Image (tube, rainbow, N blue to C red):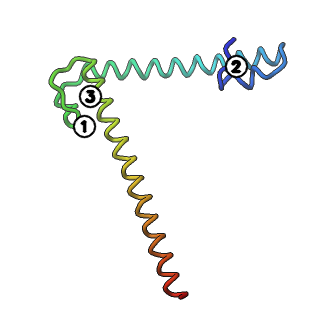
Amino acid sequence: MIDTPRMSKAASLPIGGKRNEAILFEGCKLERENEALRKDAERYRWLRDKVDADAYYEIGIILDTCKPDEIDAAIDAVKLAEHLDNQQMIVDMLNEERMMQEVEAKLKEKNNG
């Protein structure tokens, strides 16, 4: 059996009843998770195939055609852009915080000096 991070607790148990139960329990959890992910994917594909290009445009996705692979690629690109925008916003906030700390330190030095 392949030892995955989720199965590591079960795999660390002695061979026998409790280990088998733990492995079965983890397997059932993974099956439920897999089923939920499959349903999400089915819903997404159904919606993707039903929506016209105008609806995608409303959320920032501009399409030349409505081929499923192109829609997926466009969605991935918009998600990546949002992620990068969020990362840049965090960097900007950290830089601003660092600058504020530097100003506060200089003011402290000036007041103590």
Depth check: 24 or 82 in front? 82
Inter-mark Cα distance, 2 to 1 = 41 Å
Going by the numbered disc 3, the residue's amino acid type is Ala
Circle 2 — which element? helix
Circle 3 — which element? helix
Depth check: 37 or 2 in front? 2
Are the residues at dot 3 and dot 1 in contact (C-beta closer than 8 Å)?
Answer: no
The residue beneath circle 1 is 59
User: Which quadrant of the view contains residue 96?
Assistant: bottom left
Location of residue 44 with respect to 16 vertically, above or below? below
Residue 37, given in percent of the width and then of the height, sits at: 48, 22
Q: Residues within 10 Å of mark 3 (few under 14, many from 20)?
A: some
Q: Residues within 10 Å of mark 1 (few under 14, many from 20)?
A: few
Dot placed on the residue nearer the N-terminal end, 2 or 1: 2
Residue in view at x 47 percent, y 71 percent: 102
User: Which quadrant of the view contains residue 17?
Assistant: top right
Circle 1 — which element? loop
Going by the numbered disc 2, the residue's amino acid type is Phe
Going by the numbered disc 1, the residue's amino acid type is Ile
The residue beneath circle 3 is 74
Residue 82, given in percent of the width and then of the height, sits at: 33, 41
Dot placed on the residue nearer the N-terminal end, 3 or 2: 2
**Position of residue 79 in the picture relative to residue 2 (left or right):** left
Instruction: Between label 3 and label 1, give the one nearer the viewer.
Output: 3
The residue beneath circle 2 is 25
**Position of residue 31 in the picture relative to residue 101 (left or right):** right
Depth check: 99 or 32 in front? 99
Dot placed on the residue nearer the N-terminal end, 3 or 1: 1
Are the residues at dot 3 and dot 2 in contact (C-beta closer than 8 Å)?
Answer: no
Residue in view at x 66 percent, y 25 percent: 6
Inter-mark Cα distance, 3 to 2 = 39 Å
